[in-house]
Amino acid sequence: MIHLENVSVEYPSGVRALNGVSLTVCKGDFAFIVGATGSGKSTLLKLLYRDVTPTDGTVVVEGDDVTMLKPSAVPYLRRKLGIVFQDFKLLPEKNVWENMAFTLRAIGAHPRDIRKRIAEVLELVALTHRCDAFPHHMSGGEQQRAAIARAIINHPTVLVADEPTGNLDPDTSWEIMQLLDRINVRGTTTLVATHDAHMVDRMKKRVIQIEAGYIVRDENRGGYQNCEL
Amino acid sequence: MNFRSAEYLVQEAFTGIKRNGVMAYASISTIALSLAVLGAFVLAALGANNFAASQIKRFQIAVFMTRDASYEDATKLSEKISGINGVGVVEIRSRDKEWAEFKRKHPNIESAGLPLNVLPYGLDVKITNPERITIIASSIRQMNKVDGVLEGRKTAMRVMAVAKVVRAVSTIGVLLLLITTAFIISNAIRLTLYARRREIRIMQLVGATDQFIRIPLVIEGIVFGVTGAIVAWLLLRAGSIYMGHTARKILTMLGHVSSNVAPLDLAIGLVLTGGLIGAAGSLLSIRRFLRDE
């Protein structure tokens, strides 16, 4: 479960990204976080994997108060989460297989388990045939599928995706959303920040709308725009 | 950390070097040139110091005995002088040789009415501590059957002053160059890491601990340093062989100027310096990147 209580974030530059945000996302939920550029969507997600610490309030992820974690404990928090980015963030000098193996090596997995788990996940994201490819030899959609595969290889309880379809065409975006949905159906809590109105409308999931650092809408099976407006 | 992880991290380091070939080449060549310059300066400084020290060791006091002094007197005086602090070897000069030399320089001496060897006995006193030359000379002057003492104090002082300057300049020079080399090498490694800062950031985001990120990069730094040191050693060896031949051709004296550093010692010194600076440069740079992210 994810719980934010009265969270505010002010950057050193003086910009207030979030203002007293409270939010609960239950285990197994799928939620879109929508809002204009600079509204605070990415900041909200960064709070979950302690890339940003709040100025006020508490952030609880899977029972851990993220704000109280020592820096040395942050890698262990991140191992509970899968993180997907708009720019994929694959290790450029490693192929798909090595990108995944690196994540498992980092947590001390046995080489036998590594082979088995990579094979399973590559099959799930339909990238088995591209396991030797380097990121710069892959299409955007393939890179994002590889990034998602890496994010879920560790069986995270929470998957956080920041604009995962921002660099993709509509068909590929839909494939990625379906993939995220399949992962969610397997029990992974999924939070997706997006600008993609078409995708949000089509998926019919929970929608949390942020404007100027405030949550202005939290609607189950919502659309990109507020129906009441 | 278990053996499996250690093996993986070493493997990661070498894969990283292989896949970042251009940056690796840039780092290694920078390290090699910096260490070669440092090594050349150290060798030149040692050579200059050794040369200055050898000049100091050549100083001796010439003792002239009175004309009535016998060989036994010269022997006794020699033993007495040997006991003075700061005195090395004392040699009794051969009167026959000196007389022969005297006659060679003055061929008309016998016809001028001086057919017999009239030269007094003399001693050459080698000094181990040139700073005591004046005290030693004064002590000898007070001894029985000593007619005169030539100490060459002014020349000795001048050479000692020059030697001191050479030692000070070379020590300061080596220290400054060592600092500069450390700065250049750590900067070269920092540039390599800067090119990989995105990689470091991704590693952090997937939950790698700082230690897991740091170890392969420190190994890379050590490999860069050691490889650069080996290249620097090869450059210095080639340079010293060429310079040795040229110097001997130009000036005989220069042929005797030597740092007295064996090639193996030079290699060990360079490899240790390169490896240490490589490791320290990597550690400091990574710490900065890990903190910045």
Image (spheres, coloured by chain):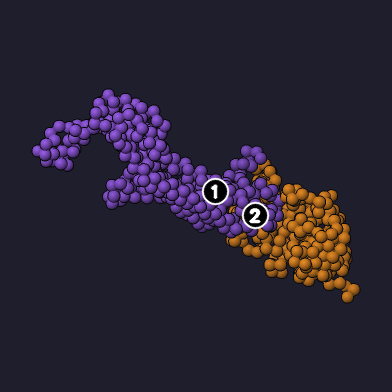
**Relative to B162, A130 lies left or right:** right
Residue B32 seen: no
Residue for badge 2: B288
Percent coordinates x, y for residue A145 in the rendering: 69, 59
Q: Quadrant of the C terminus of chain B?
A: bottom right
**Relative to B250, B115 lies left or right:** left
Residue drawn at x 86%, y 63% as measured from the top left: A20
Q: Quadrant of the N terminus of chain B?
A: top right
Residue B21, label in figure: none
Residue B116 seen: yes
Q: Chain of mark 2?
A: B
Three-letter residue code for mark 2: Arg
Q: Residues within 10 Å of mark 1 (few under 14, many from 20)?
A: many
Residue in front for this viewpoint, B145 or B40: B145
Residue drawn at x 67%, y 60% as measured from the top left: A88
Residue for badge 1: B277
**Relative to B89, A105 lies left or right:** right
How far apart marks 2 and 1 lie (CA) works out to: 16 Å
Relative vertical location of residue A133 with respect to residue A229 in this rendering, above or below? above
Residue in front for this viewpoint, B22 or B230: B230
Residue in front for this viewpoint, B250 or B286: B250
Three-letter residue code for mark 1: Ile
Relative vertical location of residue B231 with respect to residue B119 in this rendering, above or below? below
**Marks 2,1: beta carbons within 8 A:** no
Residue in front for this viewpoint, A1 or A169: A1
State the orange chain.
A
Percent coordinates x, y for residue A164 in the rendering: 72, 63
Percent coordinates x, y for residue A136 in the rendering: 59, 61
Instruction: Tell me where residue A209 sits by quadrant.
Output: bottom right
**In the figure, what tint was chain B given?**
purple
